[in-house]
Amino acid sequence: MMTKVVHAASIYYVLHTMSFLGVIDKLVNGPRGAGSTGNDITMTVNLLGVFVSVFLFWSGMRKTGAARFNKFLPLLAAGFLLASALWSVKPSLTFTQGTAYVFVVVGAIGLVQVSDRDELMDLLVRTCALSAVASVLWQFVLFPGAAFNDTEPDFEGIFSQKNVLGQVMAAGVLGALHCLRVRKGRRLRYICIIALCTTVAFLSKSSTSLVAIAALFCLDFLGRLYLKGASIGTICLSMGCALVLLFFAVNDDLILEILGKDATLTGRTQIWQYAIDNIGEKPLFGWGYAAFWVPGNPAAGQIAEAVNWEVPNAHNGLLEFLLGVGAVGSSLFLLLWARNLVMAVRCMKGRARQFGLTSMLLLIAILLIGISEQVLLAALQIWTSMFFIMGFICERELSLERDEARLGRFEIPKPGNPHSLNPSGMRQLSRQLRL
């Protein structure tokens, strides 16, 4: 019974942190009336998300006792976002959003302790595929007129905006590519999911997500070659693909034109200049997490007036970090990203090679998306929960590998063997076995 409850909580956590459950609010209040943080539906969903995170954390500690990964740094980074309420231009909003972020990290800690790594990836794939199917049904069956008139011009499906849908589809492709490598008996299923998620991402016309998906395809292929030992060819191909992907990521106007969108409407580079100017005013600690772009902030109002539209964010991951939590907070997350990168590389050289490759692809996708969109700052963004979950899993796998290597140095004597371990060796072996 307890296992079923934990599994249900895991499903809720994944759906909640990818913003899937916003569809409930959207169904009740309509596409344009949903998303308000103060309405009863949103508050109930978020409060239940907090309870689920606490339950997963408790279940994880109950199952394993001490975690085999560092919880301090991720909780410190999340705690810094919450602490920025002390100097925020909108303290109440920063406190609310910061609290939600902390509990996302808490839930990730518990989820990793109660789940197998490949089962988690399979859960991610299934929820992303469900999101794709639900979005298609929403757009073409439940509300077919909304996709073709002024009430809902973007293909956003069950989500609040097209970029959120596109990012969930990119995450689905990432998870399906992983499962395609490790689950040999279900290849057709994962190929179909990859095709479905890619198609829905194209329908959303989210250029950044399409760049990320293209990068995932290329780098997954190169990663397979690397794991098979084709190191020289992999390096050459990697350099070429990296240059091409970087070109398209920086010059995404080309993709916008292919998708039939007016590239002049994005105005990102103009926003970046205004954002840099405001970062200079509070360089160390920023304006407060999730607080800069609120309507009551005069600085954000001046930018909106200058560009002639309400700007929701800086349209750049690093600039958004610097605006919200300054150089100090940004450094914490850069340290986490670099640490996860090192662990992914080490995993690729050990027994968790396939998961190390997937973790590497995730980190590269986060970089690409961060060029033109906010990333890792929203609590209910799929990349946020995946970033922490996959970092924890990599560290756990490395810890298990180290323990197995240490245990391998001690040979347990067979019955009748006159040789035995010395007392100090027995004590060390006992400590390792208790872990």
Image (cartoon, rainbow, N blue to C red):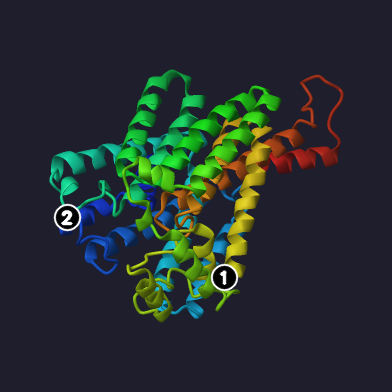
Residue 116 in view: no
Of the image marks 1 and 2, the number of the one nearer the N terminus: 2
Q: Quadrant of residue 129?
A: top left
**Residue at 46 percent of width and 41 percent of height:** 211
**Residue at 42 percent of width and 21 percent of height:** 187
Disc 2 marks a residue whose amino acid type is Thr
**Residue at 58 percent of width and 67 percent of height:** 329
Give the labeled residue for mark 2.
151
Point out the image quarter for the C terminus: top right
Disc 1 marks a residue whose amino acid type is Gly
Q: Position of residue 428 (x, y in %)?
A: 78, 42
Give the labeled residue for mark 1.
326
The one nearer the camera, 183 or 238, is 238
Q: Position of residue 57 (x, y in %)?
A: 48, 53
**In the picture provided, is 123 more to the left or to the right than 146?**
right
Give the structural element (helix, strand or loop) at label 1: helix
Q: How many marks?
A: 2
4, above or below 106, in the image: above
